[in-house]
Image (cartoon, helix red, strand yellow):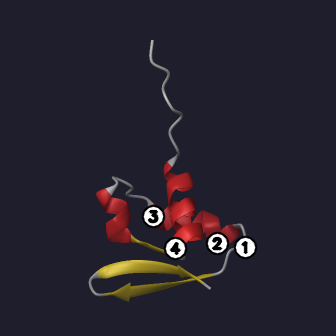
Amino acid sequence: MKKLKPQKTQFQVIWAKLRTTGIVSRNWCLKRNITRLGAYMADIKRSGVKFSANYDGGDYKYRLK
């Protein structure tokens, strides 16, 4: 029987993207069926991480400060 890899949660996917590239966008998340980006960013903000949020070119983008 083939062993399955544990999957990352949506929060883990977003946090990994922010750590590696410093930016995450709404459209990037929607392509991966992540629809609660705003709620996850609120959780990240509560943990003390500083970021800026902009509406840029028809897409919401969050950038680490």
- Please indicate whether residue 31 sits to the left or right of residue 18 in the image: left
Gap between marks 3 and 2 measured at Cα: 12 Å
Disc 4 to disc 1: CB gap under 8 Å: no
Against 58, is 32 above or below?
Answer: above
Q: Position of residue 15 (x, y in %)?
A: 57, 62
Instruction: Answer few, some or many: residues within 10 Å of disc 2's Cα (few below 14, many 20 plus, some between 14 and 19).
Output: few
Gap between marks 4 and 1 measured at Cα: 19 Å
Instruction: Answer few, some or many: residues within 10 Å of disc 4's Cα (few below 14, many 20 plus, some between 14 and 19).
Output: few
Q: Which mark is residue 48?
A: 1
Query: Total number of numbered labels?
Result: 4
Residue bearing mark 2 = 45
Disc 4 to disc 3: CB gap under 8 Å: no
Q: Amino acid at mark 4?
A: Thr
Gap between marks 2 and 4 measured at Cα: 17 Å
Under tag 2, what secondary structure?
helix
Instruction: Answer few, some or many: residues within 10 Å of disc 1's Cα (few below 14, many 20 plus, some between 14 and 19).
Output: few
Reading the chain from its start, which is encountered first: label 4 or label 3?
Answer: 4
Residue bearing mark 3 = 37
Taking the spot 28% from the left edge, 87% from the top edge, the residue there is: 57
Disc 2 to disc 1: CB gap under 8 Å: yes
The front one of 6 and 60 is: 6
Against 28, is 35 above or below?
Answer: above
Reading the chain from its start, which is encountered first: label 3 or label 2?
Answer: 3
Q: Position of residue 22 (x, y in %)?
A: 54, 76
Under tag 4, what secondary structure?
helix
Reading the chain from its start, which is encountered first: label 3 or label 1?
Answer: 3
Instruction: Answer few, some or many: residues within 10 Å of disc 3's Cα (few below 14, many 20 plus, some between 14 and 19).
Output: many
Residue bearing mark 4 = 21
Under tag 1, what secondary structure?
loop
Q: Residue furthest front?
A: 2
Q: Nearer the viewer, mark 2 or mark 4?
A: 4
